């Protein structure tokens, strides 16, 4: 059973808990979101697999997950990016924020989300158990698409797209 790191509002670890239990109880835990841009400035998106336990078949950022207990964030981001998208690179920390969102299947995401960014111009080799589809989109096109069809995107990704730090990164 995969464990997540429970944290306080200052991102101090306060314990661990089985991942599904943390999501059922809506407890604050450490997570990360990775956004990769190509050299044209487009974001690499993934469509979550239909088998995901929440937010299935929704479009989201390049990769997201949780560090394992005793795993550094650098190791976790590199590991999951390779596992989900077949991309072996080390993204750089950009910013972090806390959010809480009610999800499908009576689950709650309450995360201290660490956002990482990087550059990638290739074609991902996706893990079909994790990712159903992928595409690159410009920030302008993406924001318009989210405005037109917000239900097609994950809760955390919509927050990332409106975060002021993203504009600084994409500039």
Image (cartoon, helix red, strand yellow):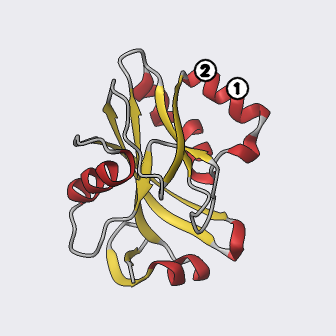
Residue 108: horizontal and vertical position, in percent? 62, 71
Tag 2's secondary structure? helix
User: Residue 22 or 95: which is nearer the viewer?
Assistant: 22
Looking at the image, residue 76 sits to the left or right of residue 9; the answer is left
Q: Quadrant of the C terminus?
A: top left
Residue 24: horizontal and vertical position, in percent? 60, 81
Q: Is residue 70 above or below residue 48?
A: below
- Assess disc 2: are there few (<14), some (14-19) or many (≥20) residues with their C-alpha within 10 Å of its C-alpha: few
- Residue at mark 2: 140
Q: Who's the residue at 38% across and 64% down the image?
A: 66
Q: Who's the residue at 70% across and 35% down the image?
A: 146
Question: Residue 14 occupies which quadrant of the picture?
Answer: bottom left
Q: Residue furthest right?
A: 148
Residue 29: horizontal and vertical position, in percent? 44, 71
Looking at the image, residue 12 sits to the left or right of residue 111; the answer is left
- Residue at mark 1: 144
Q: Is residue 169 above or below residue 97?
A: above
Tag 1's secondary structure? helix
Q: Residue furthest top?
A: 40
Mark 2 and mark 1: Cα distance apart in space = 6 Å
Asked if the residue at tag 1 contacts the one at tag 2, i.e. Cβ–Cβ closer than 8 Å, the answer is yes
- Assess disc 1: are there few (<14), some (14-19) or many (≥20) residues with their C-alpha within 10 Å of its C-alpha: few
User: Residue 5 or 36: which is nearer the viewer?
Assistant: 36
């Amino acid at each position: 059973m995969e464990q997540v790191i429970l944290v306080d509002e200052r991102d101090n670890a306060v314990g661990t808990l089985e991942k599904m239990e943390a999501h059922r109880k809506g407890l604050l835990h450490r997570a990360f979101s990775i956004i990769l841009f190509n050299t044209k400035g487009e974001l690499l998106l993934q469509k979550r697999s239909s088998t995901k336990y929440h937010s299935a078949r929704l479009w989201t950022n390049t990769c997201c997950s949780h560090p394992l207990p005793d795993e550094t964030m650098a190791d976790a981001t590199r590991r999951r990016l390779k596992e989900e998208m077949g991309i072996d690179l080390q993204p750089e920390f950009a910013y972090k924020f806390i959010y809480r969102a009610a999800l499908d299947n009576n689950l709650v995401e309450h995360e201290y989300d660490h956002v990482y960014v990087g550059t990638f111009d290739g074609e991902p080799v996706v893990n079909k158990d994790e990712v159903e589809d992928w595409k690159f989109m410009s920030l302008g096109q993406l924001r318009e698409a989210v405005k037109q069809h917000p239900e097609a995107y994950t809760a955390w990704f919509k927050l990332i797209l409106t975060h002021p730090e993203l504009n600084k990164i994409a500039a």
